[in-house]
Amino acid sequence: EMQTRTKRRAIRLVGLLLLAALFLSCTPAGVGVWRWLGTVSGFGDWPQEPELMEVHIMDVGKADAILIRCGSRSALLDAGHGVSAESVIDYLYRHDVRKLDYLIMSHPDRDHIGGMPQILRELPVSFFVQGRISDNLLPDSLEYKDLQAALKETEVPQIILRPGESVSIGVAQLTALGPLKEYKNTNDSSLVLRLSCLDFTALFCGDMEKGAEQDLLTSQQDIHADLLKVGHHGSKTSSMLEFLCEVAPKYAAISVGPDRNELPREEVLARLEQLGAELYQTDTDGSIVFLYDGKDVVIKTDK
């Protein structure tokens, strides 16, 4: 009988210890204890899942729609033409994006904002982000009017991001580098963003042209980037050699489709090739995805 009582007490004690261990493992302090026990016991470091950062250059023709995701956080930079809204939303759902932390407008041209009203009405959006732009440059287009109506309907908070200011997407940072002043056209007024995640960087130029590129160079900001989203769909009015040399990209992506201007222009492609950049185009590669696991970059394309 004494042995039976002792056995029962031992079983209860083990059960209590297991319950305590289970409870402890659910607290930050408990995680630290388990990590320490794993280290001192010789079982190695506490395993951690890497933060996976993704940049998706969507195939939306001669337009822009870029998904940036880091961990559970996501941002959509531009949203293509209005006719692209359904395909952009389908793309987000196929990649398990059910809400957006940020919907970002580079500038209010039709091929960048057309899909935004429908996205605002169909997906939860935490913040709408834009750069500063002169009132006299705001368009009178149906797309822009619909965007303003959708913002009013959904009451999404708005952020005006100025140079030097940033927003966080998980462990990644999106920092505004421009526009540096009030320009006379919407292209140069594009919100220029530099993405940094550990040692990976990317530069998004909207439709910025040579004048704004020169201002960025003069500002002496750090514009170096591993990935360059080539400005203005590879137009000859952008991507001057001096600017590209300062960016020095390993990878260059151009969002482009059939167009009377025959984009991307051969001289722009030649400059990028001269710098040794690995070049991708949505018209030939389809949607382009850059995956970064904290160490290596893997590129996947639709075609």
Image (tube, grey):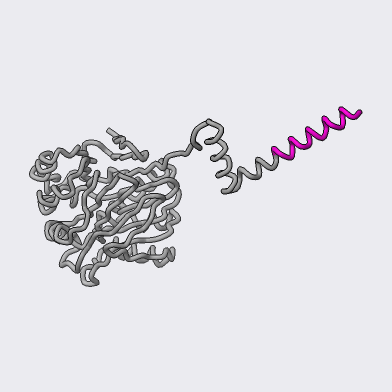
Measuring 82% from the left and 35% from the top, which residue is drawn there?
A: 9
Answer with left or right where residue 197 lies relative to residue 9.
left
x and y percent of residue 45 in the render?
A: 49, 36
| Relative to 31, residue 115 above or below | below
Residue 196 x %, y % = 31, 50
Q: Position of residue 265 (x, y in %)?
A: 11, 45
Vertical position of residue 178 compared to residue 48: above or below:
below
Q: Is residue 179 magenta?
A: no
Q: Is residue 288 left or right of residue 51?
A: left
| Residue span colored magenta | 1-18
Q: Can the viewer see residue 142 in this picture?
A: no
Provide the major secondary structure of the magenta segment. helix
Residue 107 visible in the current orientation: yes
For the residue pair 51 and 152, the one nearer the viewer reads as: 51
Given the current orientation, which residue lies at the most extreme bottom position? 135
Q: Quadrant of the C terminus?
A: top left
